[in-house]
Amino acid sequence: MAVPLPLPALHATHAGIWLADGQGDVREASRGEAIARAAETPHIILNAPLVGQRLGYPDLSGLDLLELFAFLHPARFAVPTVAGLSRTLGLEPPTADAEAARALRAIAERLLSVLADPDWREREGAWTSNATLHRLGWGWAPLVGARLERPERGERMLFSRLRQWEEAAERPPPRTVLVDPGDTSRKLDQLTGRAEPREGQRAMAEAATQVFAPKRAKDVPNLLLAEAGTGIGKTLAYLAPASLWAEQSGGTVWVSTFTKALQRQLDGEGPKLFADAEERARRIVIRKGRENYLCLLNLEDALQGAFAGRAAILAQLVGRWAAYSKDGDMVGGDLPGWLPSLFRRAGAAALTDRRGECVYAGCPHYRRCFIERAERASREADIVIANHALVMVNAARGREDAPGRILFDEGHHLFDAADSTFSVTFGGQEAIELRRWIVGPEGRSRGRRRGLAARLMDVASYDDEGGRALDAAIEAARGLVSDGWLQRLVEGSPFGPVEALLGEVRGMVYARAKAQEAGYGLETELAEPDGALVSAAAAAGEALDQLHKPLAALARRLEAVIEAAPDWLDSQARARVEGAIRGLAWRRETLAAWIALLGRIGGEADPEFVDWLAVERIDGREYDVAIHRRWLDPTKPLAGAVLAQADGVLVTSATLRGGEGWPAAEARTGAAHIAGAVERFEAESPFDYEACSEVLIVTDVKQGDISALAGAYARLIEAAKGGTLGLFTAVARLKAVHARIADRLARAGLPLLAQHVDPIDAGTLVDIFRDDPRASLLGTDALRDGVDVPGESLRLVVMERVPWPRPTVLHAARRMAALRQAQDERGGSAYDDRVVRARLAQAFGRLIRRDGDKGLFVILSAAMPSRLLSAFPPGVAVRRVPLDIAIQRVEEFLTGRGNADEAANGAEAREIELEGP
Ligand code: SF4
């Protein structure tokens, strides 16, 4: 039996603060006392940044159970709450806050008891890692060390424990086959385990076979747009023909999603396709952008001293995780999303390859590299699960693994994904990144980051021409912005032509822009620039050109060196040169786009693009100054670079048409720019929305009255007893509402979580929300689309306002274009309506996720126009009611008690006729 730990524990929520002493006796405490106690003796806590925030003492430290969990069970999922951790460890979750403080001690004991368990799966590496953590001052290390037996033989090094990937011969191109709709139907039966799949699902599976037919003509893919209502089972409907085609043709199908939630859900369907885990891992591969994965070289660097203090502890825990991770994905993979937040995000990003400094085969960990492994695995896979951005970048850059058959799920996001993928930003942050990539670390910066010169040392010494180009590039890169640039801009003393341009940009933004939300970004159209800005742009463009030329010369030289294969070019050097060629191609592309952008300043506007100037700020603090360029219609490059190059494409979503007709769907997905026929498919949701949902438009909450808004939220959440997703269009209002109601709700046993307030990533907030039916969650845009919470945990969605698009420069330009196209003034508002309908449909879509779900959708704005109600599924009752009636209705609807219709009618509520588009 475990000896009880003589350690005190500290638990804090919005409802209060509790201390458990070393014997487990619990009492309530004031903030001041809790802070003083925690400073005297390390307390067991759960999520130090969060507890610190509750205490108003952000520097709080202690024995964080989440860190211990991450050490003992790396790559294992747990909801990071007292109840969540208790359940994961087989303990009874506490039912009251006072009990939670005691539960923290029980969790600690249970976790530490794992160290003596002979069946502990993650034992290997723990002793070595704990010894280092001890030296680094990790609070748990002495407690772990006292219970962890030293292994008889020395433990293998982390890196040698990682699996190597094998080089394989290039896969032949897929054979031309025809997928039989009958086979597809049988495959679907097998996948669903039912003899009779739902009709809509079967019809969709059969329709989707046409995507896999041979391509008809150059630049004309087999293109199917499919709107499949929630609950159809569209995932299996397209996986049925996709898996058949992959098997019969020997090719790979790429399934692309926008949200991580769907990526996870798709991965969860894997066992239906391949029951055997090993086969599954080979045939279904998740791929993300390289900046998501752990770079082992960066990790090695961090473990060997490049990281100090808390960041060094994080590196050790990430090292533990790396040995047990399925795929090394640090963002949304099996690294707990909460782990980097415990370290206030210090260091986590530096462990990935965000700056494109990979040295490829020149890296000692190349054969074990997670990124390389994922890339190779995806070449051999039947199904690759990726995201829209990666699919677009691969296709646009003409990479060899550009997909031939693509199934875009969450297709309503294609427009936004293309919008950011094909955008250009030239600003201080981007320029300094480029400088660092070329010049390498300067001043006091540490780490292994090396500039081009260090990476290409042998080229510089053996190849004169290459050496000269390299020197010229480094010299020119020093003319880009350097450390302290933003401060110099503020002081009006920029250094060099690029900083001078950014100084002019900043000046023009402050002169012309109007803030949309206090303390956040400022922007202004790039139109009628003054003379100073035009001259600064010309000088900066010249400086960029001076950099582009030697980089181009260097790339040519490197290619010539590879071709000539001189004696000094051993395999390591070749690998480094090849890596540099790849990196150079990407940088030159970026530079060319920047030069083109600057070249336009003061000249003719290009009607294809929208350009604007911006000062980026968070909470009033500036962090970037930039010039932005977006395509007016980003589906043009999407169609040209991605769709037209593919052989077959399915674009599907529950809201593809966004409450409008097919032409709207074609415009949003790029289908309108494809020559040849576009096939369409639609299947209605099988859910009885009329019975299981309702929309309430609250008529008496005054716009702009924050107290009234906060009061409405609190009362609605109380009526629903939690389970509420609150959606905001402005961060400031979200914070103001949260500050007013969190304590009140917590005292009623209704925890309130909030994006932008709690120091927890959005994915983890959703996990906590999902896990606790009494919890509610406030958030902004990302939560409108990315939340998949079936069942009781989500039963009420409350939107504070009609989600009109923010009046940005980009929005104004697109609105104007819509107006020109429609040739009457309704074109502009029709454009806005389209955006709002899509957002409402997405937000409503959070409510009913599976059979048996039930919920209400409330909008706290009387100004909701009736014409937008077509965003909701047909048959859903929509009522305009005062707040009191809405609250009554929420209570009755969710408990199934009372006669709500009478209540609504009694208050002279008015049911609105749904209007057509
Ligand atoms: S190959 Fe590149 S990304 Fe992979 S570990 Fe090495 S440097 Fe990092």
Image (tube, helix red, strand yellow):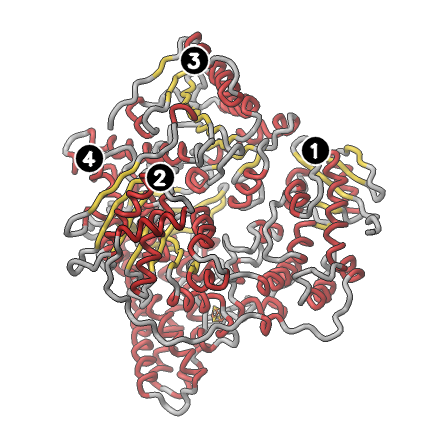
Q: Quadrant of residue 380?
A: bottom left
Disc nearest the viewer among 3 and 4:
3
In the picture, measured across the screen, residue 722 lies left or right of residue 223, that is right
Mark 3 belongs to which amino acid? Asp
**Is label 3 in contact with label 2 (beta carbons under 8 Å)?**
no
User: 545 above or below 555?
Assistant: above
User: 229 above or below 598?
Assistant: above
Please give the name of the residue rendered at 72% of the width and 38% of the height, measured from the top-left corner.
Answer: 100
Q: Residue furthest front?
A: 195
Mark 4 belongs to which amino acid? Leu
Q: CA distance from mark 4 to mark 2?
A: 42 Å
Where does residue 788 sit, x and y in percent of width and height? 46, 40
Does ligand 1 reach within 8 Å of label 4's beta carbon? no
10 vs 749, nearest the viewer: 749
- Dot 1 or dot 3: first in sequence order is 1
- Dot 4 or dot 1: first in sequence order is 1
Q: Which residue is mark 3?
A: 901
**Is label 1 in contact with label 3 (beta carbons under 8 Å)?**
no
Q: Quadrant of residue 664?
A: top left
Mark 1 belongs to which amino acid? Thr
Neighbour tally class for label 4: few under 14, some 14-19, many 20 plus, Cα within 10 Å: some
Where does residue 143 sit, x and y in percent of width and height? 78, 57
Q: CA distance from mark 4 to mark 1?
A: 57 Å
Neighbour tally class for label 1: few under 14, some 14-19, many 20 plus, Cα within 10 Å: few
- Dot 3 or dot 2: first in sequence order is 2
Label tally:
4
Which circle marks residue 819 in the picture? 4
- Dot 2 or dot 1: first in sequence order is 1
Where does residue 202 sit, x and y in percent of width and height? 31, 43
- Judged from the image, the secondary structure of the residue bearing numbered disc 4 is helix
